[in-house]
Amino acid sequence: MRRAYKFRLYPNREQTGRLERTLETCRILYNELLAERKVTYEVTGGGISYFEQKRNLVKMKKVNDHLAQVNAQVLQDVTRRIKRSFDAFFRRIRDGKKPGYPRFKGRGRYKSFTYPQHVKSFKIKSGRLSLSKIGEVRMFQHRPIEGVIKMCTLKRDDIGDWSVIIVSELKDTPKIAIEETIGVDVGLKNLAVASDGLILEPPTCLRGSEKKLAKLQRRLSRKTKGSKNREKARAKVARHHRKIARQRRDHLHKASRCLVDSADRIVFENLNINGMLTNHHLSKSIADASWGTLIQFTMCKAESAGKSVELVPPRNTSQLCSQCGAFVRKSLSMRTHRCPECGLVMDRDLNAAINIRDKFTLGQRGRACGAVSVGRGDEAGSSPNYR
């Protein structure tokens, strides 16, 4: 099991210059390696492998002084990023998705570089991060690092502040005995409603900051392009966006902790969130809710606690009655479930959460018995709170 720790860096002026030059060198190298792959395919009809590009770095460093000023393992990681980009490109082609050919990185589009090996390329000494070819950078380490340190990534945000993400490896936590399972229905009115009655409020970070954000953006639009005042206004807008993102992540971390502490197994719907974002009426609220991030945080915390998170198909979870199984069609505006068959009346989100839990439980029993369950209903892949 791997865990990432993010700490703020406070480099001095000289170290900031070295970090900026290293980042720019990595960006230029990335573009050169991408161009090499593109030209090689156009000329020969075949590709160039990751290992060939990695070997060519030795020759490139002899003719390029800028590359010689950067740690060799950092440069090798750039070739690894190119490989991952093309691996993802060909995977999307195989899956029949929109391919999205790897793009060249313009200024400001390449924001991080990685030291892939602890001790040999970087060390941590009493509150300072010692980096090869850069020096000892002051680091605010607000919590201890557990496990064996493996790698670190230095990242610059849109404002120019630097942070480090340190990845360590820990022993896997043994799974605990499952005693309680809850289903969780995510939505917009409530961020999450659990089958045991737990209700989590949605984050309103973006909605609550829209007026101030609009004011800052209007000031930015009035500034002359290329001027120092425009750059200052742009930094203020970026700083406010960063604050909103941090508030949202803090809220989602607390919400995921509540879910993990409430049960041994948490069941979510396997939602097509990207498809939901095409609805221009609800896309801003869906993006602000960040259901995918909530599920990801819950998975990470559950793994550390020895618990589990499961995903089930979202088909009919909001339309079926959780008591008798009758199909009760409801529009999004109908917030109460009323079953004409058995007379059950409850909140539609709680009804959906119970259906999510039961769908996983019945699926487990069906697999144990060798049976295949077939669901009824309406649109597949839609969210109960989204329809």
Image: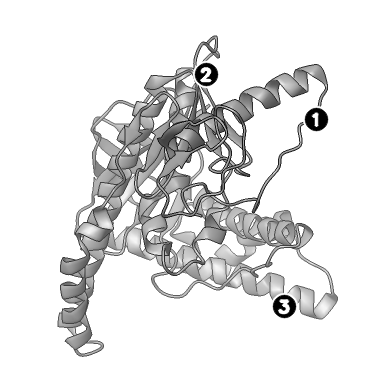
Please give the count of numbered marks on the rendered protein.
Answer: 3
Identify the residue under disc 1.
372
Is residue 317 placed above or below 173 in the rendered structure?
Answer: below
Disc number placed over residue 39 in the picture, else none:
3
Foreground mark, 2 or 3, reads 2
Side of 276 relative to 369 (left or right): left
Circle 3 crowding by C-alpha within 10 Å: few under 14, some 14–19, many from 20: some
- Point 15% across, 67% down: residue: 212
Residue type, numbered disc 3: Val
Identify the residue under disc 2.
171
Residue type, numbered disc 1: Val
Circle 2 crowding by C-alpha within 10 Å: few under 14, some 14–19, many from 20: few
Q: CA distance from mark 2 to mark 3?
A: 44 Å
Which is more N-terminal, label 3 or label 2?
Answer: 3
Mark 2 and mark 3 in contact? Answer it, CB < 8 Å. Answer: no
Q: CA distance from mark 2 to mark 1?
A: 36 Å
Q: State which quadrant residue 308 falls in.
A: top right
Is residue 32 placed above or below 374 in the rendered structure?
Answer: below
Is residue 228 placed above or below 21 in the rendered structure?
Answer: below
Residue type, numbered disc 2: Lys
In the rendered view, how is the structure colored? one colour
Judge by depth and name the residue closer to the eye, 378 or 96: 378
What residue occupies the far bottom of the structure in this picture? Answer: 224
- Helix, strand, or loop for circle 3? helix
